[in-house]
Amino acid sequence: MNFNWIPMIAAFLGFSITAVLGTVVIPFLRKLHFGQTILDIGPKWHKEKQGTPTMGGIMIAAGVLGASAVAFLTAWISHNAVAVQLTDTYRVSVLAAGVCMALCMGAIGFLDDYIKVVKKRNLGLTARQKTFMQLAVSAAYLATLCISGMHTTYIPFIGDINIVKGAGLLFWPIALLFIYGFTNAVNLTDGLDGLASSVTLVVSCAFLLASGFLKISSINVLSAALAGACVGFLLWNAKPAKVFMGDTGSMFLGGMVVALSFGIGRPVLLIFAGCLYFLEALSVMLQVTYYKKTKKRLFKMAPLHHHFELCGWSEQKIVFVFSAISFVGCFVALLSVILGW
């Protein structure tokens, strides 16, 4: 099998652009006093992070976009195999729709961060406002996929199912909630230095391998760019964090991992690859439900990473263990692809 170097270019540029941007963006955010406000409801020791620049997710978005654009342009000029899929209308539509959806999710997160930081409203957008915008973006994304020709989806152990007639039509409302849920689950995962970026690095590498095996080179390049950008951001976000991604970054990452899963035609694999995101969101739902019924807490604090913090785990230990859990889930997802489950 011929080695394709275009994804390596995407990964390298994703890392380089994001890492270098840190030298410019972080001082700029600090100059504007775009610092994180730490709420009293969190662990008390998080107060020492008060004022750390936030909205650093723009570095990740810029890294992914810049790296992907250069990689695809290089493939086109050099007549690389990747360029073949750039002539496929469906593949280009899926790729463009996925990136636009992720950017729109990131824009919603940016607006939320802006209101928190600049307008000094700690809760940002209201839950209703955020939900409406996220569902609207998700619906537009799914409509674009349907119009572009997405008429089947792959379910492990079942195979391809038709999603434009009969019972298959249930796919669309389920997919709407799926996108909304996972975008917010990634947002909930962003609560410790380096956590969301580390977990997403593992997930993006899984989709890099899966798309490579399935020979979907457009998503292969996008996955590589995301993986590189996550590493570049970790240079600044690993403990002690010099910048936080904010909702700008976490919602962009949420949109990206969703886009990668739909891009390879197997969104259901995100349930396995994104198992850590799911566990974080599940812990919040269980906490709220249990408290409403018993007035007691199931966890010391939700999302799940805060529970382990309050149990005495260090942030570094939580990041390592949660990334390892993600690795196991990603391994299962890859087995499904490789073995044709």
Image (cartoon, rainbow, N blue to C red):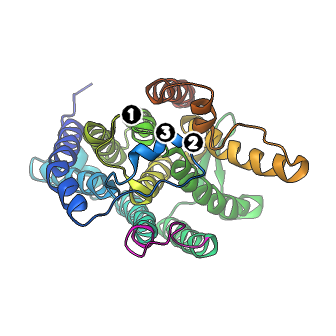
Name the kind of residue labelled 1 in the image.
Cys
Question: What's the magenta region?
Answer: 114-126
Distance of label 2 from label 3 (alpha carbons) = 24 Å
Residue hosting label 3: 45
Nearer to us in this view, 141 or 130:
130
Q: Secondary structure at mark 1?
A: helix
The percent coordinates of residue 217 (x first, y second) are 32, 44
* Circles 1 and 3: CB atoms closer than 8 Å: no
Which marked residue is nearer to the observer: mark 2 or mark 3?
3
**99 vs 275: above or below:** below
Please name the residue shown 78% across and 38% down the image.
298
Residue hosting label 1: 205
Name the kind of residue labelled 2 in the image.
Tyr
Whether residue 4 is visible, yes or no, is: yes
**Relative horizontal placement of residue 139, taking residue 199 as reference (left or right):** right
Per the rendering, the mark at residue 277 is: 2
Question: Reading the chain from its start, which is encountered first: label 2 or label 3?
Answer: 3
